[in-house]
Every structure is written in structure tokens, then in C-alpha cells.
Image (cartoon, grey):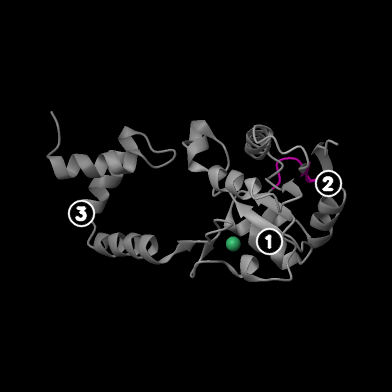
Amino acid sequence: MAYPAPVEHLVEAFERLPGIGRRSAERLAFHVLRDPSSRELARAIEGALDDARRCDICRNVCSGERCAVCSDPERDEGTVAVVEEPRHVEALERAGVFRGRYHVLMGAFHPTDGTEEHHLALDSLLERLRGGEIRELILATDPDREGEATARLVLEAVEGLGREDLIVTRLARGLPAGSAIEYLHRGVLEDALEERRPLRRRRP
Ligand SMILES: [Zn+2]
């Protein structure tokens, strides 16, 4: 027996969220239907979708067309740190150890958790790299399993571009395994950046 169409649509919408199976989707849908504050949730989702923008260049969340980092002429355009989430940009900015620019993938490659390649801001990164101004790409994804898989995915995509002059580096090993960049101290982040290791060197 099927649910009425509007209820079925709601269940299916929840089912598309990462880590949510059919049973959980049904539970969430019926919770929403009986909870009087659900309209507020619906408005908050609509408001965020309407008003929170992604930077045209680095895909970080921002309120205008470009984020503060991409609008800052003092930041080095030639060096770009690829990070998973906006909170990783916040961590690096707070530490004040990086003067380049960013690219925010908006997730880590984790198919079993529902985050697949097409969810990540990979196409916009390749588009930026085609421009030729970026000399070095620092893969600053987390030093955990998903972060490593994401770094490999980015590296493979970049290899397909045919940009022989591009240097690709990874944050130094020595970061606590399985740690998250956002929780690291300034000194650790600084060392990881300074001692970054090449995954791909400039080819003459
Ligand atoms: Zn930006």
C-alpha cells in the first residue's frame, strides 16, 4: 500500500539525504507532519536556499557574488588550497597561516554516505585551472580516509587537464591520523602547509 502522493514525495525527499534510508525517511516525514514547528523548518530551508550564495569563484558560502578572500587583491591567486567544507576555510583563516586562495568542494568523496563525485565542486575547480593562473594546488582535505579518497579524486581529475606546468601538493604527513583540519592548532597547520609534499611536479 502506498502513501498519498504528497506524503510519498516527502518521504522520497528525505530519502535523498545522505545516510537516510527508507525507514528513517518515513520516520522523519511523519515527524514533520505532526510537528507544528515544521513550517518554520520549511521556511528556514527556503530562506537558506534563496539567500545563502556560493562564491562564483571558490564556491565557498557567501552573501554576495564573491567571498571576501576572492575579492582581496592581496591574496595570491597562484596558490589554491582545496578544502572540503567552509569550516575548513574558517580554520585556516583563523590560524592566519595561508595567504593564497581556496576552492571549497562542499563535501568529501564518500559514496557509501551518499556523497558522490557529482556532489563536489570539481567542475568549477577544473574550470579555474583551465584559466592557467593557478601555479600550485594544495590538497588540504582532512587526513582521514574520506579526505585521502577526495585528494586522490581531485588529483585524477587534474591529471586529465594536461596542464604540465601545474604543481599539486598535499599537506604534510605528520598530521594526526584521522584528525580534522578544523581542530588543529595554528602551529600544526603552519607546519603541514610549510612541509607540504608534491604529488605531482612541474614537468619541463
Ligand atoms: Zn571565493
Q: Which residue is mark 2?
A: 196
Name the quadrant containing residue 142.
Answer: top right
Q: Which residue is mark 1?
A: 91
Q: Quadrant of the N terminus?
A: top left
For label 1, count other residues whose C-alpha is less than 10 Å away and answer few (under 14), some (14-19) or many (20+). some
The boundaries of the magenta stretch are 169-179
Give the quarter the ligand 1 occupies: bottom right
Percent position (x, y) of residue 40? 29, 65
Q: Earlier in the sequence, mark 1 or mark 3?
A: 3
Q: Residue at x 27, y 39 (%)?
A: 12
What residue appears at the point 54 percent right and 43 percent down from the top-left corner? 123
Q: Nearer the viewer, residue 167 or 23?
A: 167
Q: Nearer the viewer, residue 1 or 157?
A: 157
The CA distance from mark 3 to mark 2 is: 52 Å
Q: Is residue 149 visible?
A: yes
Of discs 1 and 3, which sits in the foreground? 1
> Dot 2: within a 10 Å radius of its alpha carbon, few (fewer than 14), some, or many (20 or more) residues?
some
In this rendering, would 125 be left or right of 178? left
Q: Residue 157: which quarter of the image?
A: top right
Indicate the amino acid at tag 3: Arg
Visible residue check, residue 107: no
- According to the picture, the residue beneath numbered tag 3 turns out to be 34
Distance between mark 1 and mark 2 Cα atoms: 17 Å
Q: Circle 3 — which element?
A: helix
Element marked by disc 2:
loop
- The amino acid on which the numbered mark 1 sits, given as a three-letter code, is Ala
Residue 25, position as x, y percentages in the image: 31, 40
